[in-house]
Amino acid sequence: MFHRFAVDFFRLCLWLLIIMMIFVPLERISALHVQKVFRRGFVIDLGYYFLNNFLPKLILILPMALVGYAVHRVIPAMFYSGVAGLPLRIRFAAALVIGEVGFYWGHRWSHEIPFLWRFHAVHHSAEEMDWLVNTRAHPVDMVFTRLCGFIPIYILGLSQPARGTLDYVSLLVIFTSTLWGFFIHANLNWRLGPLEWLLTSPAFHHWHHTYEEPLNKNYSAMLPFVDRLFGTHYSPKSEWPSRYGTVAPVASGMADQLLQPFTPPAQNG
């Protein structure tokens, strides 16, 4: 057990180094806001990087196994066999779209339902944006949105962990969405031109993190057409938000941030 943990920890350190080597120079060359590499909150986000690469996977094992078992009991095996026979690229592309719709609603509910917002507010508490803010998330929030994204993928058979074989679709979806998550949180002044009709950009997601008007826009992680479909798209061509964070009081330390959502909200008066 310790050996496996050590290997996973080394792997995470290596990935962190690679990601830093990509985004830190880019943010120096094309910075949107002038800020330090080791900005305020960097150490906290580093802690979330390691925590959220271990804990949510452990929490998700049981519910995802139950979902996989349930859908295979309800939906005919012939349907799943047919989907499993599709080329990997087709299943992966379909899983990205279907998973994005599920993630969109999980993310949107996390803003609209007060109980879920208590956990999601941790992610929005960052007042300076860069690539590592992608990792700042309460594990409960991450588990919820990941379930919302993967349950429809499992129901449609695009990913079939119950088959007992290596689940390439899930791995590719997680890898792609995680890497893109680092990009859209980055402190980059990049726009993608016509591609922004197809893919989210830092500008698109930075507007989601502001507490200026308009609020509650741009819930999609990769595919902005989902926001267009549900009426929450906002991405002006020549404007950027100037402030980030949330008006909701969020504790400053990581330990307090993890515990705060479980405590009763303060009563006025």
Image: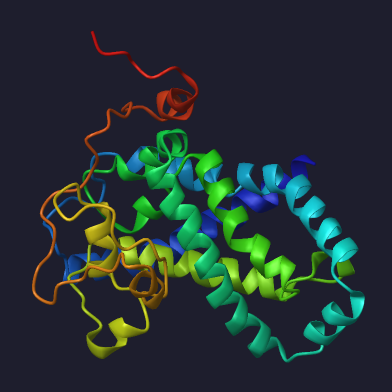
Q: Position of residue 154 (x, y in %)?
A: 72, 66
246 or 102, nearer to the observer: 102
145 or 58, nearer to the observer: 145
Q: Relative to 32, does residue 85 appear above or below in the rendering?
A: below
Q: Image check: 64 left or right of 266?
A: right
Outermost residue, top side: 269
- Disc count in the image? 0
253 or 119, nearer to the observer: 119
Q: How is the image coloured?
A: rainbow
Residue occupying image coordinates x 14% and y 72%: 236
Residue occupying image coordinates x 19% and y 46%: 211
Q: Position of residue 75 (x, y in %)?
A: 84, 69
169 or 118, nearer to the observer: 118
Q: Image check: 43 left or right of 241?
A: right
Q: Position of residue 253 (x, y in %)?
A: 36, 27
Residue occupying image coordinates x 22% and y 43%: 127
Residue occupying image coordinates x 19% and y 65%: 28
Q: Relative to 254, does residue 163 appear above or below in the rendering?
A: below
Q: Image check: 261 left or right of 61?
A: left
Looking at the rendered image, the quarter that the N terminus falls into is top right
Residue 225, quarter of the rendered image? bottom left
Q: Position of residue 188 (x, y in %)?
A: 22, 68
Looking at the rendered image, the quarter that the C terminus falls into is top left
